[in-house]
Image (spheres, helix red, strand yellow):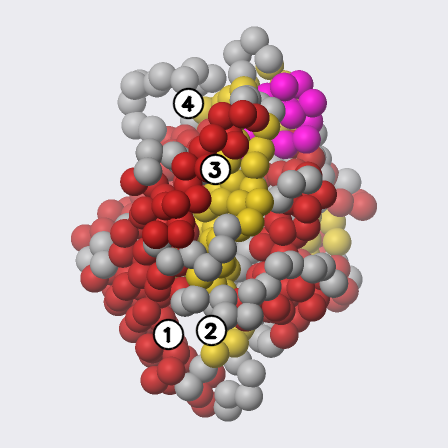
């Protein structure tokens, strides 16, 4: 696609410095290596330079220059991605959004906020909550991940079961195109039936079509009360089946999370945090209720007690203090990072229709046993999104590089057969690209590559990934 790409030289570096300042162009090996890795396995790709613009106009000018000179550009947020979406596999320039980190406005009258992509998710959430408003999407990395990265993958998090994912809160985007132009993709309105929905096209596009420079989010009223429940189960399949029983009760939890005992133990050890482990419990469901009436939440929790018990729960516990609830959440949120400290691993972001989750869980365990690897599973059971961590442990180089991908293909084939797909919130990036044929026919890929050609005819944006 497009012209042959090249690596920037000294004259290109000088030109980029003229756009955004000498100190905003980083070229030391240490700086480039840091920008050449994310949380995806142990992969690293060295860019020639890292550029840190501070305005949307600088982003547009950088893209225009790189497009004119056939220099690849890979957008980067906080580097917390798990699919390799921000890895500069063709070298070139990494465009870091850390310099675009302002909360521009919080509009209480219209329940909206305008922010730049380098704002940390949790910083934004805290700012709007101080105004009595709420932004629900909260990935496990919320304390470090950037909102721009959340846009790139349409990140979800635990509260998607009730509130939806990132894309459900995006009203409008300012985007820099490879042509050097800045556009707004939509309007700051809840309703918009005017032409193609370019806003939603950009959400989840992983920096392959343009680079987001401003985001207009819709917000909702802040729930003032929360109640956290924990239900241990003897096995993962019974826990998965319990999810549907909970939702059929008519009560929709704000979060409905699943954790295998092995992941809980690893997280407890890594974070030095206690958790109420039961000796005969292999899997845990964590349910959070929220709203504005504490007595109603307690009533809902009481209604769920017999539902969980009939589904096979060994016990039902409630966090009676905010500190205890935060302790349980810390264990849940830290599993992914803790597993990374245990072993090199591949994290598969499987997702199926919610009722098919027990079948997916059983298949994952069977496939792991057949190929001889250990899995740690956890995720957002309320929306059928299961994170499958495949640990390398003592697997040989050959098994890890040749046999495990076959197993992953089998897992993804199960997802497809069950009506699901291969990524719920982590994106395709680099490492999932070889499996796209499982869920897409040639016509799908032809249409998507045609869209890529319209936006980025020279193929400078995030090259080497699934889109080109």
Label 1: few (<14), some or many (≥20) within 10 Å?
some
Residue 381 percent coordinates (x, y): 41, 51
Answer with mark 2 or mark 3, whichever residue precedes in sequence. Answer: 3
Q: Using the numbered discs, state the Cα–Cα distance from disc 4 to disc 1 in whole angstroms.
A: 44 Å
Answer with mark 3 or mark 4, whichever residue precedes in sequence. Answer: 4
Q: Report whether residue 448 is seen.
A: yes
Q: Would residue 364 be found to the left or right of residue 336 on screen?
A: left
Q: Nearer the viewer, mark 3 or mark 1?
A: 3
Label 2: few (<14), some or many (≥20) within 10 Å?
many
Answer with mark 1 or mark 2, whichever residue precedes in sequence. Answer: 1
Q: Using the numbered discs, state the Cα–Cα distance from disc 4 to disc 2 in whole angstroms.
A: 42 Å
Instruction: Name the element at disc 2.
Output: strand
Q: In the depicted view, which residue is nearer to us: 428 or 158?
A: 158
Label 3: few (<14), some or many (≥20) within 10 Å?
many
Q: Which residues are magenta?
A: 125-136
Label 4: few (<14), some or many (≥20) within 10 Å?
many
Q: Nearer the viewer, mark 4 or mark 2?
A: 2
Q: Which residue is mark 4?
A: 186
Residue 447 percent coordinates (x, y): 24, 47
Q: Nearer the viewer, mark 2 or mark 3?
A: 3
Q: Which residue is mark 3?
A: 301
Q: In which quadrant is the N terminus drawn?
A: bottom left
Instruction: Name the element at disc 3.
Output: helix
Q: Using the numbered discs, state the Cα–Cα distance from disc 3 to disc 4 in whole angstroms.
A: 41 Å
Identify the residue shown where x is 50% and y is 90%: 396
Image disc number at residue 45: none
The question of residue 135 being in magenta is answered with: yes
Q: Which residue is mark 1?
A: 365
The question of residue 142 being in magenta is answered with: no
Residue 322 percent coordinates (x, y): 68, 39
Image disc number at residue 375: 2
């Amino acid at each position: 696609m497009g012209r042959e790409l090249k690596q920037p030289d000294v004259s290109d570096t000088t030109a980029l410095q003229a756009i955004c300042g000498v100190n905003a162009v980083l070229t030391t090996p240490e700086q480039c290596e840091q920008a050449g890795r994310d949380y995806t396995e142990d992969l690293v790709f060295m860019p020639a330079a890292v550029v840190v613009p501070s305005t949307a106009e600088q982003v547009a000018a950088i893209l225009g220059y790189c497009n004119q000179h056939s220099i690849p550009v890979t957008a980067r947020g906080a580097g917390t991605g798990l699919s390799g979406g921000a890895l500069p596999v063709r070298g070139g320039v990494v465009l870091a959004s850390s310099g675009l980190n302002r909360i521009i406005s919080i509009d209480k009258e219209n329940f909206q906020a305008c922010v730049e992509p380098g704002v940390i998710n949790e910083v934004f959430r805290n700012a709007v909550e101080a105004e009595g408003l709420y932004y629900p999407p909260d990935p496990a990395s919320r304390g470090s991940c950037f909102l721009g990265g959340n846009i790139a993958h349409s990140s979800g998090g635990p509260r998607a079961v009730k509130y939806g994912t990132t894309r459900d809160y995006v009203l409008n985007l300012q985007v820099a195109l490879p042509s050097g132009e800045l556009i707004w993709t939509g309007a700051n309105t809840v309703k918009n039936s005017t032409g193609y929905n370019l806003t939603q096209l950009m959400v989840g596009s992983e920096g392959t079509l343009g680079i987001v420079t401003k985001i207009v989010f819709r917000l909702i009223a802040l729930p003032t009360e929360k109640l956290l429940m924990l239900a241990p189960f003897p096995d993962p399949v019974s826990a998965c089946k319990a999810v549907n029983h909970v939702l059929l009760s008519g009560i929709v939890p704000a979060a409905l999370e699943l954790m295998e005992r092995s992941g809980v133990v690893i997280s407890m050890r890594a974070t030095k945090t206690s958790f109420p482990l039961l000796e005969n419990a292999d899997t845990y469901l964590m349910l959070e209720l929220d709203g504005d009436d504490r007595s109603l939440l307690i009533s809902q929790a009481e209604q769920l007690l017999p539902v969980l018990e009939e589904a096979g729960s060994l016990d039902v516990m409630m966090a009676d203090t905010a500190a205890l609830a935060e302790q349980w959440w810390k264990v849940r949120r830290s599993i992914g990072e803790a597993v990374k400290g245990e072993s090199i691993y591949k994290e598969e972001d499987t997702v199926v229709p919610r009722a098919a989750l027990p079948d997916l869980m059983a298949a994952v365990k069977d496939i792991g046993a057949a190929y001889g690897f250990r899995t740690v599973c956890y995720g957002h059971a309320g929306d059928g999104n299961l994170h499958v961590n495949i640990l390398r442990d003592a697997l040989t180089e050959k098994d890890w590089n040749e046999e495990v991908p076959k197993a992953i293909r089998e897992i993804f084939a199960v997802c497809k057969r069950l009506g699901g797909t291969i990524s719920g919130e982590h994106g395709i990036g680099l490492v999932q690209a070889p499996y796209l044929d499982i869920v897409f026919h040639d016509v799908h890929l032809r249409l998507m590559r045609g869209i890529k050609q319209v936006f980025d005819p020279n193929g400078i944006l995030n090259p080497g990934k699934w889109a080109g």
